[in-house]
Amino acid sequence: MAIYQALQQQISALERSALEAVQLKDAYQILQSVTGIGKILGLTIMLETGDIHRFAGAGNYASYCRCVDSKRISNGKKKGRGNAKAGNKYLSWAFSEAAHFAVRFEPLAQRFYERKKAKTNGIVAIRAVARKLARATWMMLKQQQPYEAKRMFPG
């Protein structure tokens, strides 16, 4: 228990120093409303995203976050390979971490994850949750509205 408490103190000190080093924007408060996005993930997403208005749509943002497939298909046939490394690797990591936490603590996300996992596998299902989080983040930041799980994971 003593080791756990010592680690918690170190984590708290690191979070405080990170928050002091950065000028927080309104986007940070909006990101904090998402289940699964904590202080450090919120900072990472806020700093790596920059101005949300540079993305034309939610799909463009999700693509920048590496949350979509990079397939090139025409008439159901594979026509080469896309660039899987295009986009921001830090946002990809942040949304994957947020997806894991969302599945643990958000019942609607957990239901969505379980349905996806039954059809495919766990990795594909987590990436689907990450994609939903990325799209929801774009909507929230664009409209300056807090997170609503029912809008993101309907029935």
Image (cartoon, grey):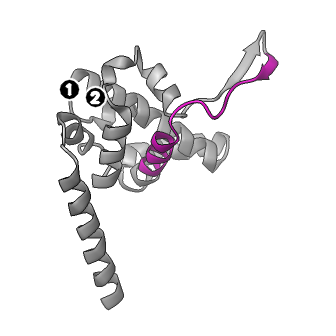
Of the residues shown, which amino acid type is indicated by label 1? Gln
Q: Considering the image in quadrants, where does the C terminus appear?
A: top left
Q: Which image quarter is the N terminus in? A: bottom left
Label 2, secondary structure: give it: helix
Verify CB contact (< 8 Å) between mark 1 and mark 2: yes
Q: x and y percent of residue 5 in the render?
A: 28, 83
Q: Is 1 situated above or below 148?
A: below
Residue 144's disc number: 1
- Mark 1 Cα-neighbour bin, 10 Å: few <14, some 14–19, many ≥20: some
Of 108 and 72, the residue lying toward us: 72
Horizontally, residue 103 falls left or right of residue 19, namely right
Q: What's the CA distance linking mark 1 and mark 2?
A: 5 Å
Q: Position of residue 10 (x, y in %)?
A: 29, 74
- Which amino acid is tagged 2? Met
Residue 94 lies in the magenta stretch: yes
Magenta segment boundaries in residue numbering: 77-99
User: Which image quarter: residue 137?
Assistant: top left
State the residue position of label 2.
140
Residue at the front extreme of this rendering:
21
Position of 124 with respect to 63 (left or right) is right
Residue 1 visible, this angle: no
Along the line of sight, which residue is nearer the eye, 76 or 40?
40
* Viewer-closest of 106 and 56: 56
**Which quadrant of the structure image shows residue 87?**
top right
- How far across and down, in percent of the image, does residue 41 sit? 35, 49
Q: Residue at x 34, y 82 (%)?
A: 4
Q: Is residue 103 above or below residue 58?
A: below
